[in-house]
Image (cartoon, grey):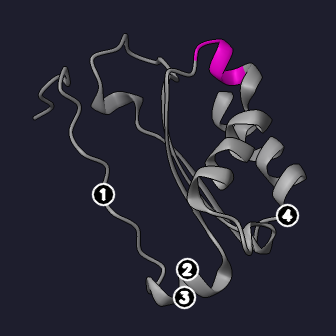
């Protein structure tokens, strides 16, 4: 549910050429079914000329309601199309959670 809300708000605000919102809650020590930790990859020309901090602040502003509620953490990766292409469409893997459950 929250993943879809996050996607819809980002699509409306940034008109991304690529968007991926991954629920990574399972990697953290949270109750089963919790939607609290997300990884967001957004590629949009609206980020052109903006510093990373400004991009993140823009995303946080759009997602303020979710962050005030059950969403605990966002791993943000915001790129222009040129930056995304130079990365060969790859982003760093999320680090393990310090309080993560071990999943076999």
Residue furthest out toward the right? 12
Alpha carbons under labels 1 and 2: distance apart: 15 Å
Q: Secondary structure at mark 1?
A: loop
Q: Identify the residue under disc 2.
A: 84
Alpha carbons under labels 3 and 2: distance apart: 4 Å
Alpha carbons under labels 4 and 1: distance apart: 24 Å
Q: Secondary structure at mark 4?
A: loop
Q: Nearer the viewer, residue 102 or 39?
A: 39
Q: Quadrant of residue 90?
A: bottom left
Q: Nearer the viewer, residue 47 or 23?
A: 47
Sequence-earlier tag: 1 or 3: 3
Alpha carbons under labels 1 and 3: distance apart: 17 Å
Q: Identify the residue under disc 4.
A: 15
| Count of marks, rendered view | 4
Residue 27 lies, with reference to residue 10, above or below; the image says above
Q: Is residue 30 rendered to the left or right of residue 41?
A: left
Q: Do the numbered discs 3 and 2 sit on residues whose CB atoms are within 8 Å?
A: yes
Q: Nearer the viewer, residue 99 or 50?
A: 50
Q: Do the numbered discs 1 and 3 sit on residues whose CB atoms are within 8 Å?
A: no
Sequence-earlier tag: 2 or 4: 4
Q: Identify the residue under disc 1.
A: 93
Q: Residue at x 69, y 23 (%)?
A: 66
Q: Identify the residue under disc 3.
A: 85
Q: Which stretch is magenta?
A: 66-70
Q: Do the numbered discs 1 and 2 sit on residues whose CB atoms are within 8 Å?
A: no
Sequence-earlier tag: 4 or 3: 4
For the stretch drawn in magenta, what is the main secondary structure? Answer: helix
Dot 4 alpha-carbon crowd within 10 angstroms: few under 14, some 14 to 19, many 20 or more: some
Sequence-earlier tag: 4 or 1: 4
Q: Is residue 100 rendered to the left or right of residue 79?
A: left
Dot 1 alpha-carbon crowd within 10 angstroms: few under 14, some 14 to 19, many 20 or more: few
């Amino acid at each position: 549910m929250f993943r879809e809300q996050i996607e819809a708000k980002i699509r409306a605000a940034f008109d991304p050429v690529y968007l991926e919102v991954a629920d990574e809650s399972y990697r953290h020590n949270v109750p089963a079914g919790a939607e609290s930790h997300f990884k967001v990859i957004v590629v949009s020309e609206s980020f052109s000329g903006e510093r990373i901090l400004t991009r993140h602040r823009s995303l946080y502003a759009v997602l303020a309601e979710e962050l005030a509620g059950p969403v605990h953490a966002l791993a943000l990766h915001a790129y222009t199309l040129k930056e995304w292409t130079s990365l060969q469409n790859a982003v760093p893997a999320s680090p393990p959670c310090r309080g993560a459950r071990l999943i076999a």
